[in-house]
Image (cartoon, rainbow, N blue to C red):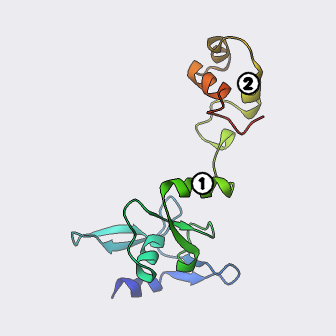
Amino acid sequence: MTLENRFSKKWILEPNSGCWLWIGAMGVSKYGQIRVKNADGFWAMGYAHRVSWRIYNSIIPDKMHVLHKCDNPSCVNPSHLFLGTQKSNMEDKALKGRQIRGEQSTQAKITEKNAISILNDTRPHKKIANQYNISASLISRIKTRRAWRHVC
């Protein structure tokens, strides 16, 4: 069975959005996956939306990403996909409000309320850092708006 035939059996149409929802294997990233032969002839897992692009459009140039207009990672509808760079992918994510920041991050060590207090604190960075049990360099990044820049 060809890749195109296998691919066509692994999605269903969502009538309201027009998304082709992947019903095959899913990765932890919530992107569909399908087995494809790589350049060496070995089987490997490929992202379904990238495979869709290759089947219905063309090759994907080096360093290019296949992005979703619909913001649905399980969508493989080629008319919902477009090519972009890593930079344009990040800009698209931020523009659409999908950027994880602040307390939403599992890496956050302080709250937004703490970040605002730090911005207004005039004490030496080391003293502030000790109070919040974080590094003085994070205090510096907050005060220079390289971290927590979304807070007032």
x and y, in percent, of residue 123 in the image: 71, 11
Task: State the image quarter where residue 45 is shown.
Answer: bottom left
Q: Which mark is residue 101?
A: none
Q: Which residue is located at x 71 percent, y 32 percent?
A: 111
x and y, in percent, of residue 92 in the image: 61, 58
Figure check: 144 above or below 24: above
Residue 119 falls left or right of residue 40: right
- Nearer-N-terminus badge (1/2): 1
Residue that badge 1 annotates? 91
Residue 48 falls left or right of residue 119: left
Q: Which amino acid does label 1 sit on?
A: Glu
Figure check: 67 above or below 51: above
Pointers 1 and 2 in contact (C-beta within 8 Å): no
Figure check: 128 above or below 53: above
Please state which of residues 132 and 52 is positioned toward the viewer in this rendering.
Answer: 52
Report crowding for label 2: few under 14, some 14 to 19, many 20 or more residues within 10 A (C-alpha). some
Q: What residue type is labelled 2?
A: Leu
Q: Which of marks 1 and 2 is in front?
A: 1
The answer to whether residue 53 is seen in the rendering is yes
Task: State the image quarter where residue 143 is shown.
Answer: top right
Q: Which residue is located at x 78 percent, y 34 percent?
A: 152
x and y, in percent, of residue 67 in the image: 53, 66
Please, what secondary structure does the residue beneath circle 2 have? helix
Q: Which mark is residue 119?
A: 2
